[in-house]
Image (cartoon, rainbow, N blue to C red):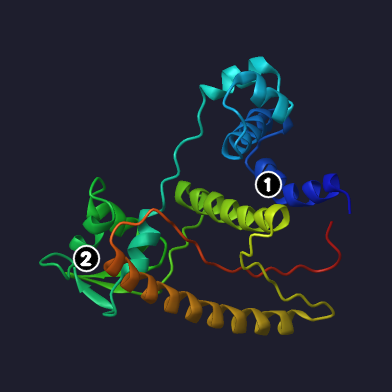
C-alpha cells in the first residue's frame, strides 16, 4: 500500500466528520496546512519561515500567516479527570470537607465552578445528584450529542492514538497498538463480543486509574502525561 493510500484511509473518518458538520474541502485547507506546520515545528525543523516552507511544501506567505494562528492549547477534559480521580466510595457528599464532590471538583479545576462540572457529568450519565449527595453511576465520561466536550474528547483520543501509531512506524517507539479483528460474524455474535470486550476494557482502565492516583500522590507534579484506551468497531459488509 502506498503512503498516499494510507493517508486517504486514515483521513476518511475525519472527512465524514467534516461533511456531517457541513464543511467541505475548502474549509479544511487551513487546518491541514496548520497541521503540517505544527508537525514540522515539533520535529526539529529550524524555526524560520523558509525552513518551514521547505519542509512542509507550504508557500512562505502561508507559513507567515499561519504562525500567527497558533493552535489553541490542549486543555484536558476536566470532567474526565474528575471521574479518574473519583475515590473508591460510590457516593460523595455534595459539599463539606475534603471528601466532598465540591472539593474533588476544585482539585481538578479551580477556575470552573463545581456546579458546572456536576451538570456536565449528570448530562453525560456519569453521576446522579441525589439530594445532598452525588452518586457515581459509571467510571467513565463520554459526553454525546456532538457537544464541544465530545469533540475535544474525539480530538484528544484521535491525536494520541495517531501519534502513538505514527511514532511506531517512524521511530519504532514501542507504543502499545494492537487490535483483534474477525469477519464472518452475525449481529448477535458481534454484540456478544462487544460486551465482552467492553467489560474487560473497563476493568483494565479502572485498574490503571487506581494505580495512576497512587503514583500522582507519590510523585507530585511530573512533566509526563499519559493516555491509555481502547476501541471497538464493527460494520456490515466491505468498507472502503
Secondary structure beneath label 1: helix
- Pointer 1 residue: 14
Mark nearer the N terminus (1 vs 2) = 1
Residue at the extreme left: 96
Identify the residue at image location x=52%, y=66%: 228
Determine the image quadrant of residue 103.
bottom left
Nearer-the-camera pick, 39 or 201: 39
Residue at the extreme top: 61
Residue 225 x, y percent position in the rendering? 44, 57
Residue 38 x, y percent position in the rendering? 58, 35
- Quarter of the picture containing the N terminus is bottom right
Disc 2 packing (10 Å; few <14; some 14–19; many ≥20):
many
Disc 1 packing (10 Å; few <14; some 14–19; many ≥20):
few
Q: Rounded to the nearest whole Å, what is the CA distance between mark 1 and mark 2?
A: 37 Å
Identify the residue at image location x=62%, y=68%: 176
Residue 80 x, y percent position in the rendering? 40, 60
Secondary structure beneath label 2: helix
Left or right of 119: which side holds 10? right
The answer to whether 122 is drawn above or below residue 116 in the figure is below
Determine the image quadrant of residue 106.
bottom left
Left or right of 74: which side holds 160? right
- Pointer 2 residue: 101
The answer to whether 55 is drawn above or below residue 204 in the figure is above
Left or right of 190: which side holds 69? left
Determine the image quadrant of residue 178.
bottom right
Residue 200 x, y percent position in the rendering? 55, 82
- Quarter of the picture containing the C terminus is bottom right
Left or right of 164: which side holds 84? left
Amino acid at each position: 500500500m502506498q503512503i498516499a493510500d494510507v493517508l486517504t484511509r486514515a483521513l476518511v473518518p475525519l472527512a465524514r466528520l467534516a461533511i456531517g458538520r457541513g464543511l467541505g474541502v475548502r474549509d479544511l485547507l487551513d487546518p491541514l496546512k496548520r497541521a503540517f506546520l505544527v508537525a514540522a515545528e515539533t520535529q526539529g525543523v529550524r524555526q524560520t519561515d523558509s525552513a518551514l516552507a521547505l519542509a512542509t511544501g507550504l508557500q512562505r506567505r502561508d507559513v507567515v500567516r499561519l504562525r500567527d494562528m497558533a493552535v489553541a492549547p490542549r486543555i484536558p477534559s476536566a470532567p474526565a479527570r474528575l471521574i479518574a480521580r473519583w475515590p473508591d466510595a460510590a457516593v460523595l457528599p455534595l459539599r463539606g470537607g475534603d471528601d466532598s464532590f465540591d472539593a474533588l471538583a476544585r482539585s481538578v479545576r479551580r477556575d470552573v465552578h463545581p456546579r458546572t462540572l456536576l451538570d456536565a457529568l449528570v448530562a453525560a450519565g456519569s453521576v446522579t445528584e441525589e439530594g445532598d449527595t452525588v452518586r457515581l453511576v459509571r467510571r467513565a465520561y463520554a459526553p454525546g450529542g456532538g457537544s464541544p466536550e465530545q469533540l475535544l474528547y474525539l480530538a484528544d483520543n484521535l491525536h494520541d492514538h495517531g501519534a502513538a501509531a505514527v511514532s511506531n512506524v517512524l521511530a519504532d517507539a514501542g507504543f502499545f497498538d494492537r487490535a483483534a479483528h474477525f469477519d464472518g460474524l452475525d449481529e448477535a455474535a458481534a454484540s456478544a463480543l462487544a460486551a465482552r470486550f467492553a467489560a474487560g476494557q473497563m476493568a483494565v482502565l479502572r485498574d490503571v486509574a487506581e494505580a495512576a492516583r497512587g503514583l500522582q500522590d507519590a510523585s507530585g507534579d511530573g512533566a509526563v502525561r499519559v493516555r491509555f484506551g481502547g476501541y471497538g468497531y464493527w460494520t456490515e459488509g466491505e468498507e472502503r
